[in-house]
Amino acid sequence: MTPKITALAITLNEEQNIERYIKSLDFVDEIIIVDSFSTDKTVEIAKSLHVKVIQNTFVDFSSQRNFAINQASNDWILFFDLDEYVTDDLKKEIIENVTNPNEKVAFFVKRQFNFLGKKINYGGWQNDKAARIFNKKFCQFEGLVHENLKINGSAGKLKHKLNHESYFTFDSYNAKLNLYSKLQAEKLYAKKLKPNAYHFLFRPFYRFSWQYIYRLGFLDGKEGFILSYLHAFSVFKRYLQLWMKYRKLE
């Protein structure tokens, strides 16, 4: 007998993705959306599809995700992002593994990253995977940004990939990285790190070189260059926002 499953998502202005996300999860027993007070039609669309929506102020990613987990009625959780698409083969594999977990309390899924409508194969994305299925009794998120799932037990890995349809415009992806930069700056500020020339010059350069050259991002063409540039610039913005926090104290 398959255990009951709750699918969770955290949202902010996801009207373009919310319907696809909900309809792709027709095999779960409960869907809960935790929304950070969207100003578009995200909440309206979700409610029209008879999904439970809870609005909660966003503080950081781990807090928002853990809040969502606490709302779930079932132990087994599916926690996909709105730009991730669950294929039919992956659905079958999820059900099989949740039904017979073999002492596993979480499962990692490889993600096929797509950017500006193109499949990305290099730049570090070729090894991209994330824990998206887990038993909430043994798992909890930690970290302000690029949050990790702390797994108290054994984890498995699914065979089928998750389609990660990440951002069809430059501006939308840049906005996401800006949020990450802000949260990372807050984390560094709490550690009392003061930025200097090393952080402003070397760290962005290293990030670009690592992604574009060392991890072969240049093989993805102009999309590979844009991704490498955006991530390098987000590193620069992280330390710029950190510097601005100290300037406000002067």
Image: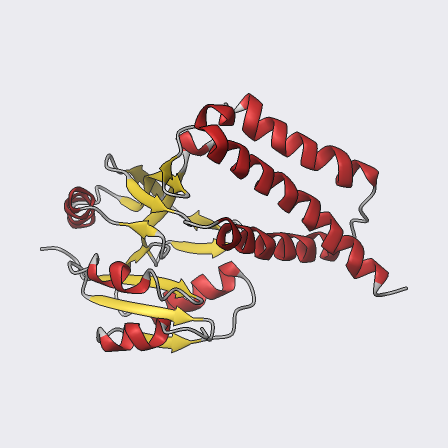
Expressed as whole percent of the image width and height from the top left, the position of residue 120 reads: 40, 33
Q: Residue at x 26, y 67 (%)?
A: 31
Q: Work out whether residue 236 or residue 74 is closer to the camera in this orientation and state it.
A: 236
Is residue 247 shown left or right of residue 175? right
Q: Considering only vertical position in the picture, is 153 above or below 34?
A: above
Q: Considering only vertical position in the picture, is 79 above or below 156?
A: below
Is residue 147 shown left or right of residue 182? left
Expressed as whole percent of the image width and height from the top left, the position of residue 131 reads: 37, 46
Expressed as whole percent of the image width and height from the top left, the position of residue 189 reads: 74, 56
Q: Work out whether residue 30 or residue 118 is closer to the camera in this orientation and state it.
A: 118
* Residue 123 visible, this orientation: no
Q: Considering only vertical position in the picture, is 210 above or below 44?
A: above
Expressed as whole percent of the image width and height from the top left, the position of residue 198 reads: 79, 36
Is residue 125 shown left or right of residue 233? left
Residue lying farthest to the right in this orientation: 250
* Residue 161 visible, this orientation: yes
Classify residue 119 by image quadrant. Answer: top left
Classify residue 1 by image quadrant. Answer: bottom left
Is residue 182 shown left or right of residue 13? right
Q: Residue at x 52, y 53 (%)?
A: 171
